[in-house]
Image: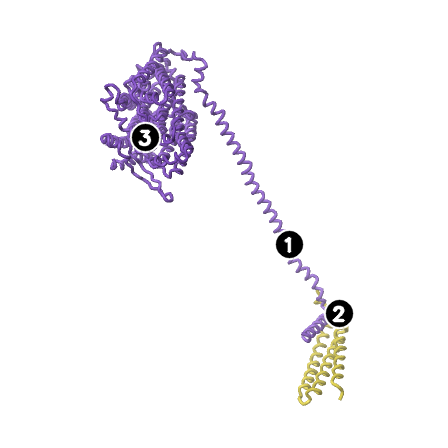
Chain colours: A purple, B yellow
Amino acid sequence: MENLVTLVPLIPIVPLLTFAIIVVFTRRNDKLSSYLAVAAIVISWLLSMVIVLSALTQMPQFAEEPAAHLTLLRIPTGATTLDIGVQIDPLTVALLFMVPTVCMMIFIYSMGYMKGDPRYSRFFAYICLFATGMLGLVVADNLLLLFICWELMGLCSYLLIGFWFEKPEAMWAGLKAFITTRIGDVLLLLGMVMLYWQTGALRFETVFEGVQGLAQTNPTLMYIIALLIFGGAVGKSAQFPLHVWLPDAMEGPTPVSALIHAATMVAAGVFLVARMLPIFVVLEGMPALAWVAAIGAITAFFASTIAIAQDDIKRVLAYSTISQLGYMIMCLGLGGFVAAVFHLITHAFFKALLFLGSGSVIHGAGTNDMMEMGGLRKKMPYTFWTFLVGMLALAGVPPLAGFWSKDEILATAFVENQAVWVIGTVAAFITAFYMTRQVCLTFLGKPRDKDIHAHESPPLMYVPLIVLAVGAVLLGFLGVPEDFPVLGPLLGNPLHHLLADQFRQWSYVHLPHVEFNPSVLLVSVAMALGGIGLGYLIYGRKPLVAGQRDPLERMGVVWTVLRNKYYIDEIYRATVIRGAIGLANVCFRFDSGIVDGTVNLVGKLTERWSHVSGLFDTYVIDGIVNGVGRVTSAVGQELRYIQTGRVQNYMIIVVISVLLLAGVFLYM
Amino acid sequence: MIPLTWFLIVAAFLFCIGLYGALARRNAIAILMGIELMLNAVNINLIAFWRYITPEVLTGQVFAIFVITVAAAEAAIGLALIISIFRNRETVIVEDVDMMKW
């Protein structure tokens, strides 16, 4: 792996160069820009596959040996240096399998979806830049490079959500996303700074060594640092309470929703926590980890309840994403590193599939509103079947991928914290329910809007759907527990073998070992089927017709609260935003009153002073100068009377002078 | 012998009278007369000093003769000037010849 690590920097750099090329050279040429972008991601994909395959073929040594590093930049910082570089370790390999693959599918899909858009080239430039950020994040071996890529992705998210900036909703959504995640970013930065201050390094491995000491000497600080870094994840992965930006981010083009807000960027928060797991477990009693689990569980449950009551096809998926991310975070909070990463990978595939499928639906039906759809099954078969696969995977129906990963999570929860298990299981039921509702409203029954002329999407769009669907079906088998009857020993759980020893070097990290529990598995399956059954009962048996109201409206107040997302946006507007605007006003008044006042005062004083100075100059200085002249003239006026014109007077003066001089000479 | 001092006193007296005349008389010719008196007073001083201090040398006498000569020439010129002024101003009162007044 040591030799291969030299390939790693190319993985994010190729898309970066492509971004530059598109921006500088090929902006006018839409086709060329898209081909370049797809070529770039294919190159990154090939390089990643080389690394993944060589890692997998070198198992089990690969998992046991320490990570291969390549240092790209050495920044001298006083006595030590800050090394910025890349690494290949099991977690990186797992992500390098998922990220380029999903990105590649979405790039290809975008060629079809964005056709005809006036800013087509710009779109591809932006997604290339985004790919750089995500790939760089995955391969980074230190917090600084991670943070840079993190911020880069935040920027691209803003640019892409607000891609259709003529729509004010899109523009505001982009701002909302950026600012909300910024809160998390600031917390992350603070955590990073404190970590650097205490351990003297930002490289993951060095940090993990250093925090052992810090946990002994200053446990409170360690706790705070862990929470701050988690704060970054809360923002980026849209966990409660910073989840508000993700539903609004659906204003962006659907490939953007798939790429950034389902498969990759929002997974970055989960990735961060997974990467930095040692700092969460290093403290005695692991208090920080408890927060992680709590927030994850809350988010998983509450987002799934909101998803029930949404009509916009993408909003349902957005809340679903928030909920599933909550599952991953919750799992990490219980120490379930392998299960969380497993779910991250499988979720990326089926969520991207669902989003691209919804894009296909929107493209074909011309609307986002599920209440206006219906009967698309016959008109858009490829979309329907792939969407169905995605839905079943998400609901957790065996033997699809989502079932295996979600079950791992629930099994871990059952062992570690039963309360969390209950929440997760209920959320699984709700998940299955709302997905069934979505499929029924969109695809089953008769079309509710006569004006919609739905048509299937072009192959450029449905082929990626098929590829992703295959992933959604098959990927689960990479993580089947070894003690699962029949399949377990047959498949050997390669994912577990890859990832289980990620933190072997740091003895203080003890990941729970979860035995296979058949009753938990049966409960999970029951939840999934139960949710689907209930959904079908309400929405599928007699599909809604045009004008019919949603049957769940009978829930009354509950329905309204859910539909309005628990009014959280409104609460924030009344409290946080009003507070921020108030503060801004205070600062503005301070600035225009005191600061500007001072500046203006200084100006006025200077003006007055110069006026006084002028007077001084006019009267005093000029007075003296003129005075000298006047005095001379006055003296002259008086002295001229000496000249009487009479010679005798002159002679008298002469005589007196002679006498005086004689006196002087005689007596000196 | 008469003491030298008496000669000097006489010369001083004459000089003062002549000075008074030159400074206080209104008529131009009277001023000239005063000037002549002053010059003669100087002559008396010269001769007295010669006779009493260095009688063997001729310097004193020669100097006196110079003075007389110059006095004469100067009186001539003075009179010529006064006549010229009289022709222009119709007056010999020096008080009235004050065109160079401020």
Q: Position of residue A144 (x, y in %)?
A: 36, 36
Note whether A208 is above or below A251 in the view shown. Answer: below
Residue in view at x 63 percent, y 55 percent: A624
Q: Which residue is mark 3?
A: A30
Disc 3: which chain? A
Which of the two residues, B51 or A482, is positioned nearer the viewer here?
Answer: A482
Q: Which dot, 1 or 3, sits closer to the camera?
A: 1
Helix, strand or loop for disc 3: helix
Q: Are marks 1 and 2 on the same chain?
A: no
Amino acid marked by disc 2: Glu
Mark 3–mark 2 Cα distance, whole angstroms, equals 118 Å
Q: Which residue is mark 1?
A: A623
Helix, strand or loop for disc 2: helix
Mark 1–mark 2 Cα distance, whole angstroms, equals 42 Å
Q: Which residue is mark 2?
A: B95
Note whether A656 is above or below A43 in the view shown. Answer: below
Residue A111 seen anywhere in this rendered image of the structure: no
Q: Quadrant for the N terminus of chain A, please.
A: top left
Q: Which dot, 1 or 2, sits closer to the camera?
A: 1
Estimate how packed mark 2 is, as few (under 14), some (14 to 19) or many (20 or more) residues with alpha carbons within 10 Å: some
Amino acid marked by disc 1: Gly
Q: Quadrant for the C terminus of chain A, please.
A: bottom right
Disc 2: which chain? B
Residue B61 left/right relative to A355: right
Note whether A391 is above or below A265 in the view shown. Answer: above
Q: Position of residue B4 (x, y in %)?
A: 74, 85
Residue A462: image quadrant is top left
Which of the two residues, A134 or A355, is positioned nearer the viewer here?
Answer: A134
